[in-house]
Amino acid sequence: MKDFDLIVIGAGPGGYVAAIKAAKLGMKTAIIEDIRVGGTCLNRGCIPAKAMIHAAGLYKEIKQEGEAIGIYADQAHFDYQKIVNYKQETSDELVGGIEALLDGNGVERIPGKGTLHGDKRVTVKGADGTEAVYTAERVLIATGSVPALIPVPGIDLPGVLTSDGVFQLTEMPESLVIIGGGVIGVEFATVFANLGAKVTIVEALPRILQNLDKEISQNLKMILKKSDVDIHTGALVNKIEASDQGLTVFYEEKGKEQTASGQYVVCAAGRKPYTDGLFAEDVTIDMDGKQIDTDETKGFETSVKGVYAIGDVVPGIKLAHMASAQGIYCVEKMAAERDGNTSCIPDINLNAIPACVYTDPEIAQVGMTEADAKEQGIPVKTGKFIMSANGKSLITHEERGFIKVVAKEDTGEILGAQMMCARATDMISEYVTAIANGMTVQQLLKSVRPHPTYNEGITEALEDVFGESLHTVPRRRKK
């Protein structure tokens, strides 16, 4: 007899969701975690970052926006340590909630670092050095990722931080140089620029948020510059040195060596799968570079039968909600196999995964952009609504923003959407639902959205696909 039906290694958003789902489907389940449940997302990523974004945004709104509507707060100031405490309390409360969910669903929590053996035994080494061995019919690897460091001289200097290190700061930095203009980089830039720090972004790619819609990248660059963020793209970092200002980053831009100095340097150049100590010597598993290779049609099973992997350790989108969705998909496939229904397709759709950036304004995107469709030779129609004509956006003095939708030219089926506006990360779910269910523009237009709301912009963008938006000056049609 095995100790468990399923052992999950890693209790981040992929692992803990999979464990709870497995328990609800009748599997005797254990989960192994060597730090705290919640993984990077709840402890060193999504949640603490968004808590700090909220605090910094509130300060900016009070300090800069209030005067325009007759609210004066000349003496407004902040206590950075209290912001840090608020961030930590938010994470702690969510972690406690997940622990209660695991316990309440009968999932056994095993503290320590798990190592997988070839026969699906898992050795767990506790913080005190003691070891225990567990067995299972199936093992799910959900160990996530850790910050990646770029290989340049000076990357190990004191004051060079990863995202983990930023969250450990107890005093407000005066200045930062952020290496990387992806999601992590621009979110940190938003936080510290709103709190008054001098921020510089150095990005190797041609634009910030390179993987998102080009118009989004261009708009965000202008908005960050208004907050005095200095942005350098197409800039390759050569080295980091200690200096009178703290640290100086040397980089090449347009063929010339440039420098940027700050109290700290934040390396936000991506993340890498965390598999240190995961496999014993008797385990041979197929890899895709540093990532674990899996077969999605078999519920993310690896080359070792009965061993699965999800989340940041496998190829594909690296997002918390993607890991959770993969965990549910994986466990539902396990349950179908257990019940003899091996052809069963889980309910969850992994083809419509939204990407969100919590800048000001928020950014969200799902599915294809117009450029993607053109590259794939798919004829499309697009609709766009500028949110400066939206009543709720005017009330709240939102920055420049828009909503775009991409639909098949012949059927009107929605293929993608891009948003840059207030509450974009909440509203994108309407388009995610549409894409996951093959819905059309006409079907979404059947819904009446309340006034005044940001959601009205969704209707306007959909109507604009046919040139029928009521609050947009008509586009000139080709004769």
Image (cartoon, helix red, strand yellow):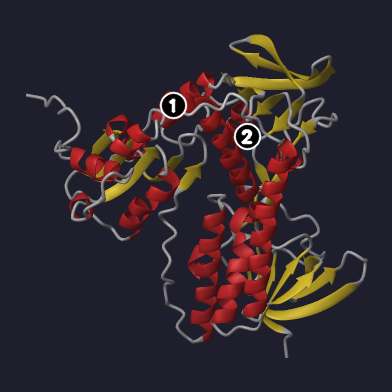
Left or right position of 320 against 381 = right
Spatial CA span between label 2 and label 1: 30 Å
Instruction: Give 219 or 338, whichever is nearer the viewer.
Output: 219
Label total for image: 2
Picture residue at 48% right of the left edge, 80% below the top: 336
Residue 391's x, y, as percent? Answer: 29, 36
Q: Secondary structure at mark 1?
A: loop
**Quadrant of the snapshot with the C terminus:** top left
Label number found at residue 70: 1
Which of the two discs, 2 and 1, sits closer to the camera? 1
Left or right position of 107 against 282 = left
Left or right position of 341 against 443 = right
Residue 32's x, y, as percent? Answer: 74, 69
| Position above or below: 187 against 316 | above
Please name the amino acid that badge 1 sits on.
Gly
Q: Secondary structure at mark 2?
A: helix
Instruction: Give 384 or 88, whichever is nearer the viewer.
Output: 88
Picture residue at 47% right of the left edge, 24% below the top: 67
Q: Which residue is mark 2?
A: 188
Q: Residues within 10 Å of mark 2 (few under 14, many from 20)?
A: many
Label number found at residue 353: none
Please name the amino acid that badge 2 sits on.
Phe
Residue 29's x, y, as percent? Answer: 66, 79
